[in-house]
Image (cartoon, rainbow, N blue to C red):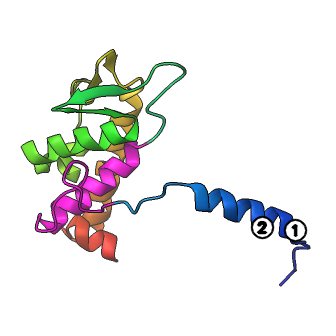
Amino acid sequence: MARIPATLSLDKIIEVARTLASLDLRRSDAFDPRFYPPKDADIEATYNYFLAMVAIDHRTNIGDRQFTRRVGDDVFTGSDLLWRLGMEMFNRDSSFFSPANLRRLDPAVVRDWLVGDYGPVWDYGVRAYLLRDVGSMCLGIMGQLLGSSTFQVLRS
């Protein structure tokens, strides 16, 4: 294996260490019900949710336009808002994230789901395409595996 020539700078190491020590870092709660399904949620519905949400979690703010909305008593922006809206949909109807539903998802449905204070998230059509693609890919793979669930496909 080829070695990459590198040198270490003690001054830079100290600078990075001090910067990291000054940050107010907190551990993310993987079970925060505002963004993620509860521990006791159906495992396949949870897999479907994470697969779909990761597929569309990109560039929610564009230029000076922020994807921001008040949900209940809190204001969410960017990815936090996207995942918050995702959980609202999951709580209303977790089958929304099923491959069969995603495969035929209309961009207008995505637009209406992801409305911010200024209007919809800027590229709802791309997000609808990505969701349809995820649904089609999962159904295609599941069909090849003779009706396996999304959970079984992802575990294989």
Placement of the C terminus among the 4 image quadrants: bottom left
Residue 9's tag is 1
* Residue type indicated by callout 1: Ser
Q: Residue at x 22, y 24 (%)?
A: 112
Amino acid type assigned to the residue bearing label 2 in the image: Ile
**In front of the other: 37 or 29:** 29
Instruction: Pinpoint residue 16: horizontal percent, then vertical percent.
Output: 72, 61
Q: Are marks 2 and 1 in contact (CB under 8 Å)?
A: yes
Residue reaching furthest left?
Answer: 92
- Can residue 73 be seen at all in this image of the molecule? yes
Label 2, secondary structure: give it. Answer: helix
Residue found at the very far bottom of the displayed protein: 1
Q: Which mark is residue 78?
A: none
Up/down of 149 relative to 75, above or below: below
Quick one: label 1, few (<14), some, or many (20+) residues within 10 Å?
few
Label 2 – label 1 distance at C-alpha: 6 Å
Is 80 above or below relative to 155?
above
Residue topped by disc 2 = 13
The quadrant where residue 10 appears: bottom right
**In the rendered image, which quarter is residue 9 located in?**
bottom right
> What span is in magenta?
29-57
Above or below, comparing residue 138 to residue 81 in the picture:
below
Q: Quadrant of residue 79?
A: top left
29 sits left or right of 12 in the view: left
Q: Residues within 10 Å of mark 2 (few under 14, many from 20)?
A: few
In magenta segment, residue 36: yes
Which residue shows up at 48% across the image and 35% down it? 59
Picture coordinates of residue 60, whole percent (x, y): 43, 32
